[in-house]
Image (tube, rainbow, N blue to C red):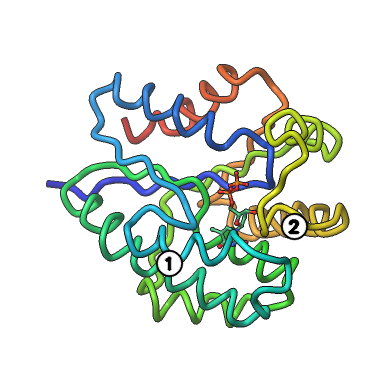
Amino acid sequence: MRRGRFITLEGGEGVGKSTQLRALTAALEARGVEIVATREPGGSTGAEAIRALLLEGSDDRWDARSEALLFAAARADHVARKIRPALDRGAWVLCDRFVDSSRAYQGGGGGITDDDLLMLHGFGSQGLLPDRTFLLTLGADEAMQRLAVRDAGEADRMGSKPADYQARLAARFMEMAAAEPDRWCVIDAGKAADVVTRAIVADLEVWL
Ligand code: TYD
């Protein structure tokens, strides 16, 4: 049995990752692929417990290094308990955010170096990287509008950051995509949801 494919969705808040995750799951299942759909932080019992520590409370609850360690610990549990076992039995894993979110948020926005984040990932998750990462991009104005509709103004701890932080992380995501073009595929998420889904499935066609 061949190992399954590991596919991640990345991007800022409000770009429609969760909608795409659901649509992609349905589209790929219709093609006969076993899909495990999951998200970070969380995705396993231990990681969901860490998620609550990360997303609740005041903005300054954690210092930058503790926060990076908590994300890496959550990811390690998620990889060991859910992602690797699924890939090993041949299922495809679709994950809403993964290590690249740490590289963008804790790195680009939070000041931890990329080398340090990859070192934590090397230890925690044995350096597991996705086979394909879709970066969903949206203009800042449209992302804000979508978020206002979704959250009615209420953001969680990680989402309640200022606009310049959002801009820095969008730039960091684009930088990572440009640095590793074989893994990343940049998708314009400003199009209708079904058009976005079709673009992603078209890119995955070679593996179907
Ligand atoms: P979530 O409510 O899942 O937001 P979203 O819909 O934007 O994915 O919250 C996840 C938040 O945690 C989000 O603001 C991004 C942040 N995050 C990090 O800072 N580092 C990470 O490694 C991950 C996985 C998420």
* Secondary structure state at the residue bearing disc 2: helix
Q: Residue at x 28, y 55 (%)?
A: 82
Secondary structure of residue under mark 1: helix
Residue 191 pos. (x, y %):
69, 21
Q: Residue 109 in the image: x percent, y percent?
A: 75, 66
Q: Amino acid at mark 2?
A: Leu
| 29 and 65: which is toward the camera | 65
Farthest-out residue, front: 57
Vertical placement of 170 versus 80: above or below? above
Give percent across and percent down for residue 26: 37, 23
Q: How many marks?
A: 2
Pick whichever of labels 2 and 1 is earlier in the sequence: 1
Marks 2 and 1, how far apart in space?
Answer: 21 Å
Quarter of the image where one finds residue 46: bottom left
- View extreme (left): residue: 1
Residue ID at (52%, 75%): 118
Mark 2 or 1: in front is: 1
Q: Which residue is mark 2?
A: 169
Give me the residue at 61% from left, 33% from top: 16
Report whether 94 appears left or right of 70. Answer: left
The residue to which callout 1 is attached is 74
